[in-house]
Image (cartoon, coloured by chain):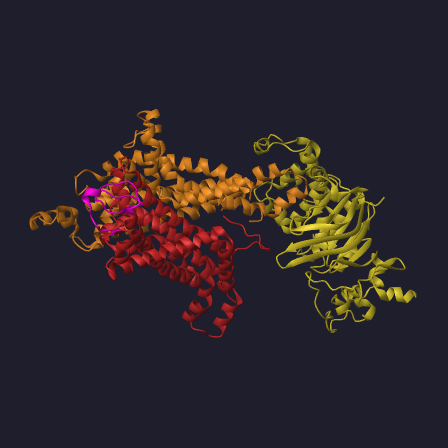
Chain colours: A yellow, B red, C orange
């Protein structure tokens, strides 16, 4: 059974100016132990998807349609108490800015300890926590082990350090440690290496891949950076304007994309080996999330668009190992 | 480029739709109008209006001392038989004039200081801010009292004494905003184009600092009105027979058990007026800082 | 130099010029007043000889900078001269009255803190609900009510009917603790309410801001109980900046004490300064003003110290610097 199954998910936000269709009907599957990349530009709905998977969407956002199944269970109908067990315990989230994810006035070790303790022993009264009476030596040990596993040197001492004492790369490792601490079945990683030095990024990616393979953790890696996807992911899902455009094994999608949007994305990557080439820029703009077009979302920017594309957004058609939401694929078969 | 127009739009929209904001605006406008009216009425109309509707605030009536509230005297009379309601209405003048004067003084001085220290930075900034810290080391009332010892009594003295005490707040607020504005592109552009410094300060930086200054001014007005009342209460306010709320309360204390209305109504006037300014200030401040999708948070 | 030490030195370097500046201002008040201070003290009918004698005694014939140096050297020793009215040592006058003002101010501050913390926190936690509306309206009224009128109301509505609260004077806690409480309670309420209101607003706003932070979201996404997050993580972070404000508010507390002492007839420094103003008794005014400035600076230094210990961003010597 898949670890994660998303079916026709729609997530809308009600604002004063109208309804934002952040996620507009997507289907997605992640198998146990698989690393799936979720690729898209900003505004494509990637982060909202992650929030929706965890049922973390807050008003004015809501999920009018669709299902999210984790391990066969319907996440969207779970009560808050069961969700709290799930969060951090079985489904972990790595947030975009790790510096912001930690409380500046608590030690990093303590915060990781609190996560582990919450999942092992449940919550404690704030007073008890304030006095430090909830501290558990076994949890502490495990946290130190985890800090070591993410290659943080001197984990014993670092346990008692504050977030501002960690460099960018280190705090990201700490974030990964927090995510993997309770041995979750699924990790939702939201642009975790954006903003890091390329060399540090590479280190962290290698580390991360080793760890999740060792722990057999499924990963949904959200990014706009195709090169990371190439290094890390088994499969890739390409999103645009709230919809899935293409899905398939990473090699296949990147070497022979079956969707005009994917092709355009690949073309936009600056090439080091062809430095004199003009940068490819997609014409037009991402469609207004308040007013999505009724046809294919990419139609107005697609060089291969034709009349049929304006009727309705295309369903996914199979094309070899991939699936592509494009009428051209359907027509190629016809 | 400036955020003024939209903020003004937001403020007026909230005043129209949100009853709380509307009340604040109404009270402020009413207070200002009453103050203006009392000036006109006393100096131009020889108290014509107030005499016909109520009574003269200055008219002594020894037979009617400390009368409890009635139809003829809705707020009762004081120890000299004067109508308290009329005096409360006239008292608005002192509070508004002194409050506005002090805040105007503090605004002009403080904003200039703030913009200059923010723009030039370095030693100018250090000295300027230290000077502000020195002023802040004294409680406003004590500073005002000390200055009044020096300057003597009267409208201008009080305005200056209170104004000086409020300069640091304006300087800080302005400096803070000016610092962030200074790093904006259009300021650099103006400098590169060779605009004289004074123009850069006045035309580019200053207009974009307006909104936090307005918020500060509204709150300072509220504080100034209370401060003026306090000074009057202590006997350091403007000289009689000008009615002020503070002086009325000071006289009222002697008769606190026998004439509760005397202690109540002038104080109530202060609370209502100050509340109006605070509501307005809250309102403007919230219009300044909406949270993303419009769910504005109030303090 | 460690971060903490650096911070402390920085704060001390702040304090010194402020004190110097305060001394200049205090000195200036008397010396830049139009008119002759000696003549003010003695009144219109004094003979030129007596005025001249007093001028000599007060050192008014010396050049300004010499007078300033006299003033400062005296101030540093705690000597502010004699009252022009009673010839008593200003320092002794202040020392006599200081305990009353101190007791009143401390009580007022206590009330402000004890009331504002629960109300502010509850308001933030139950944002938008009834408890929040009550706390916000209360806070708004609190900052709009003059403390002396509140004192009058308390006298009218509480002291007079109940008869167990004295409405004039105050007993020190060292003389009779019970009497001290009854005689200090009403004035302290009158004094502390405005502070309480201000602190409530600040704390509520601070907590609401913190509740939007990234770490709150992360903690929730990791299943940590919201009560734990709110009352341990968020509260601590919201309280820290409030502590610095309390230090700054000390100024308005002392200023408020001046007026409240008048309402309740408390023989403190406030009342003394007010009568000193009327009689243009400059040595007294100077003594009080300087004292207040010193207390303010000292209190803020203390607050900064406490803050530095509590906020790990300053307290811990960062490895990365």
Q: Nearer the viewer, residue A228 or B297?
A: B297
Describe residue B176's horizontal placement relative to residue C228 as left or right. left
Describe residue B257's horizontal placement relative to residue A47 as left or right. left
Residue positioned 74% across, 58% down in the render:
A242
Q: From this view, report whether residue A97 is shown above or below residue C227.
A: below
Q: Nearer the viewer, residue C190 or B19?
A: B19
Residue A262 point in image, percent of width and height: 79, 63
Residue A316 point in image, percent of width and height: 84, 59
Furthest-right residue in view?
A334
Residue C315 point in image, percent of width and height: 51, 42
Describe residue C136's horizontal placement relative to residue A185 as left or right. left
Residue B168 point in image, percent of width and height: 38, 54
Furthest-front residue in view?
B71
Identify the image quadrant of residue C195.
top left
- Give the magenta range: B55-84
Queried whether the magenta region covers residue C88, the answer comes back as: no
Main SS, magenta region, reads: loop
């Amino acid at each position: 059974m898949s670890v994660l199954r998303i079916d026709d998910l729609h997530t809308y936000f009600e604002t004063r100016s109208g309804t934002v269709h952040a996620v507009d009907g997507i289907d997605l599957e992640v198998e146990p132990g698989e690393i799936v990349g979720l690729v898209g530009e900003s505004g494509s709905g990637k982060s909202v998807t992650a929030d929706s998977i965890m049922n973390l969407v807050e008003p004015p956002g809501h999920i009018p349609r669709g299902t999210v199944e984790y391990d066969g269970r319907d996440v969207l109908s779970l009560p808050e108490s069961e969700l709290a067990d799930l969060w951090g315990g079985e489904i972990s989230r790595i947030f975009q800015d790790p510096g912001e994810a930690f409380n500046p006035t608590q030690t990093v070790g303590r915060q990781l300890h609190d996560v582990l303790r919450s999942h092992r022993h449940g919550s404690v009264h704030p007073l008890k926590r304030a006095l430090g009476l909830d501290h558990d030596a076994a949890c502490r040990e495990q946290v130190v082990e985890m800090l070591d596993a993410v290659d943080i040197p001197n984990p014993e001492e670092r346990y008692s350090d504050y977030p501002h004492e960690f460099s960018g790369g280190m705090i990201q490792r700490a974030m990964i440690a927090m995510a993997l601490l309770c041995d979750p079945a699924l990790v939702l990683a939201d642009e975790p290496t954006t903003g890091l030095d390329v060399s540090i990024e590479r280190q962290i990616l290698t580390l991360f891949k080793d760890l999740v393979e060792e722990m057999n953790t499924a990963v949904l890696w959200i990014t706009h950076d195709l090169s990371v996807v190439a290094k890390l992911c088994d499969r890739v899902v390409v999103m645009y304007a709230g919809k899935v455009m293409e899905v398939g094994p990473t090699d296949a999608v990147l070497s022979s994309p079956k969707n005009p949007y994917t092709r355009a994305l690949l073309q936009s990557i600056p090439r080091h080996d062809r430095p004199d080439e003009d940068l490819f820029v997609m014409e037009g703009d991402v469609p207004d999330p308040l007013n999505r077009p009724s046809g294919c979302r990419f139609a107005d920017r697609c060089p291969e668009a034709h009349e049929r594309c304006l009727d309705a957004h295309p369903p996914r058609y199979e094309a070899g190992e991939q699936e592509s939401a494009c009428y051209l694929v359907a027509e190629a078969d016809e | 480029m400036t955020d003024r127009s939209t903020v003004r739009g937001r403020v007026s929209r909230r005043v129209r739709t949100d009853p709380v904001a509307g009340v604040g605006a109404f009270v402020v406008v009413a207070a200002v109008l009453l103050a203006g009216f009392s000036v006109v009425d006393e100096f131009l109309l020889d108290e014509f209006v107030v005499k016909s509707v109520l009574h003269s605030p200055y008219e002594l009536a020894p037979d009617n001392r400390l009368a409890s509230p009635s139809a003829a005297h809705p707020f009762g009379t004081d120890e000299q038989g004067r109508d308290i309601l009329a005096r409360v209405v006239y008292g608005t003048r002192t509070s508004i004039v002194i409050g506005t004067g002090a805040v105007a003084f503090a605004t002009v001085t403080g904003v200039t200081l703030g913009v200059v220290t923010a723009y030039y930075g370095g030693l100018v900034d250090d000295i300027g801010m230290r000077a502000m810290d020195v002023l802040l080391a004294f409680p406003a009332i004590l500073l005002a009292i000390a200055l009044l010892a020096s300057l003597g009594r009267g409208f201008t003295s009080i305005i200056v004494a209170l104004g000086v005490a409020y300069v640091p707040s304006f300087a800080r607020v302005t400096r803070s905003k000016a610092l962030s504005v200074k790093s904006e592109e259009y300021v650099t552009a103006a400098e590169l184009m060779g605009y004289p410094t004074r123009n850069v300060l006045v035309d580019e930086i200053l207009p974009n600092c307006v909104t936090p200054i307005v918020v500060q001014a509204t709150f300072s007005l509220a504080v100034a009105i209370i401060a003026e009342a306090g000074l009057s209460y202590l006997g350091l306010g403007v000289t009689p027979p000008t009615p002020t709320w503070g002086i009325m309360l000071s006289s009222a204390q002697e008769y606190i058990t026998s004439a509760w209305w005397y202690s109540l109504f002038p104080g109530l006037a202060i609370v209502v007026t100050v509340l109006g300014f605070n509501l307005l200030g809250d309102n403007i401040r919230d219009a300044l800082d909406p949270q993303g999708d419009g769910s504005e948070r109030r303090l | 130099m460690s971060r903490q030490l650096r911070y402390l030195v920085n704060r001390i370097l702040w304090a010194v010029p402020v004190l110097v500046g305060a001394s200049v201002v205090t000195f200036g008040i008397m010396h830049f007043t139009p008119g002759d201070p000696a003549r003010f003290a003695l009144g219109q009918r004094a003979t030129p000889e007596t005025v001249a004698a007093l001028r000599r005694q007060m050192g008014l014939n010396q050049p300004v900078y010499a007078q300033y140096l006299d003033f400062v050297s005296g101030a540093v020793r705690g000597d502010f001269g004699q009252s022009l009215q009673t010839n008593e040592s200003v320092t002794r006058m202040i020392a006599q009255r200081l305990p009353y003002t101190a007791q009143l101010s401390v009580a007022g501050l206590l009330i402000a803190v004890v009331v504002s913390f629960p109300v502010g926190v509850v308001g933030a936690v139950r944002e938008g609900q009834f408890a929040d509306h009550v706390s916000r309206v209360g806070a708004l009224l609190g900052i709009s009510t003059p403390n002396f009128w509140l004192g009058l109301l308390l006298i009218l509505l509480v002291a007079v009917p109940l008869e167990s609260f004295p409405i004039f004077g105050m007993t020190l806690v060292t003389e009779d603790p019970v009497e001290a409480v009854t005689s200090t309670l009403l004035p302290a309420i009158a004094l502390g309410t405005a502070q309480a209101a201000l602190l409530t607003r600040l704390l509520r706003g601070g907590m609401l801001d913190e509740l939007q932070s990234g770490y709150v979201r992360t903690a929730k996404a990791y299943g940590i109980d919201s009560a734990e997050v709110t009352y341990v993580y968020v509260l601590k972070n919201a309280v820290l900046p409030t502590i610095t404000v309390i230090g700054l508010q000390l100024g308005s507390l002392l200023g408020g004490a001046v007026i409240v002492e008048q309402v309740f007839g408390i023989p403190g420094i406030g009342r003394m300064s007010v009568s000193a103003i009327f009689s243009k008794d400059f040595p007294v005014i100077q003594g009080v003003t300087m004292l207040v400035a010193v207390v303010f600076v000292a209190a803020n230094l203390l607050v900064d110290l406490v803050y530095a210990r509590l906020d790990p961003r300053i307290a811990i010597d960062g490895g990365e610097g």
